[in-house]
Image (spheres, rainbow, N blue to C red):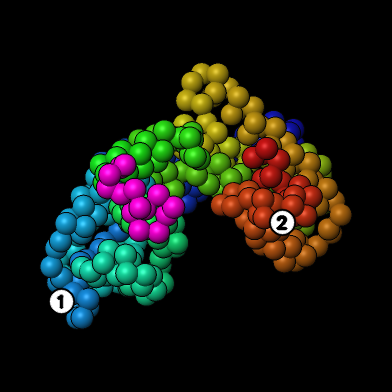
Amino acid sequence: MRPMRLFLLTVKQYLCSPFLLLLLIAAPVLCFYVSHRPATEADDRIRVGYCIVDPDAQNQIGETNEDISWLTDVLADGETLFSFYQSSSPDALRAEVARGTAECGYLIPSDLFEQLRSGNRRELITLLTSPRTTMSDVINETLFANIFQRLSGQVFLRYLTKKSAVAEYYPKAFTDQDVEELYQKYLTNGSTFSFTYDNTVNEFHYGTTAVLTQPLRGLFAVLILLCGFVGALSYYQAAEHPVFARVSVRVVRIVVPMLFACILSLVCLFGMPGVPGIDHSLTGLLLESSRLLLYALICLVFLFLITTLIPYRGILYALFPLYLMGCLIFSPIFLDAAQFLPQLKTISYFFLPTWYLL
């Protein structure tokens, strides 16, 4: 049988598969739905709850003073990745953290600043977390930075007026207002040390769409390779008849399912805006098409060698799940492990999706 005729018959065979038709229709529709669903405020920032409690009874609401009022205003207006909100009660905050509607929660005593000024700095704030909490350490630093902003100026004033070498000149040589102006000057003018952020909170949005699109290219690379494995297994079945034990049959059996996977990948990648590494333009479309075809060619060579070296179908059945699992672990799909263990960089090149993601 001529290779082109065999190719067309194989394509027709796959198109008659109900599962393949369902996949070709459902995948682009799902991508379109995820990318165009309405965004909510909760998607943009990570919710963090807190509650002001009585220092003697952590289950009761505490009274608000000037320092606490300042802190709640700063937390509400802060332009960070985290959205702090004040919960109605300690029990309500615990329930919100347990349900996952809040990343974590804080029980802040109403006399927090009085305790800090008196030198007591241990176990004042109670942190509420759940097993799903992953960012509590980063959120802690954000909260403590706001507390420090309020407290450090007061500590600085107390030091100058009571313990420093110029304390005897207070308030004749300098006043509280002078110290406050001096403190604010050196706090904000960058003369001590400062941080420069390349991406501010307004330039970065944390949402489910961003999380879903991040590993898409790598997952589609694994899908193409999986389809190639399926085609290789179908060749073993066809090669049981001597007429089909030919090189052209092997190539066609491997290429056709990978071709469908490449088309599906291309449609989905360009159907979802914001996929990392994808330029949604004509040039980007041609470039990504070339990458997919080159990657499919690499997979074809790899699978052709595998089916040549492995004479029995059962060995390939046992091999390909292990190899695909290695792709998910060592290729930079969800996480680039080589950033933490540079020795894994060389190992990752043995798994084909790494070459597509370069």
| Label 1, label 2: how far apart the Cα atoms are | 48 Å
| Amino acid type at mark 2 | Leu
User: Disc 1 designates what residue?
Assistant: 60
Mark 1 residue element: strand
**Residue range corresponding to the magenta coloring:** 161-174
Q: Is residue 217 visible?
A: yes
**In terms of depth relative to the viewer, which is nearer, 220 or 140?**
140
**Label 1: how many Cα within 10 Å (few below 14, some 14–19, many 20+):** some
The x and y percentages for residue 66 are 16, 57
- Position of 260 compared to 45: left or right? right
Q: Could you tell me the amino acid type at mark 1?
A: Gln
Tell me: residue 268, above or below residue 100: above
Judge by depth and name the residue closer to the eye, 65 or 10. Answer: 65
Residue extending farthest to the right is: 309
Is residue 11 a member of the stretch shown in magenta?
no
Q: Indicate whether 320 appears above or below 355.
A: below
- In this image, 275 relative to 115: left or right? right
On residue 3, the disc is none
Camera-nearest residue between 61 and 70:
70
From the image, tell me which residue sits under label 2.
341
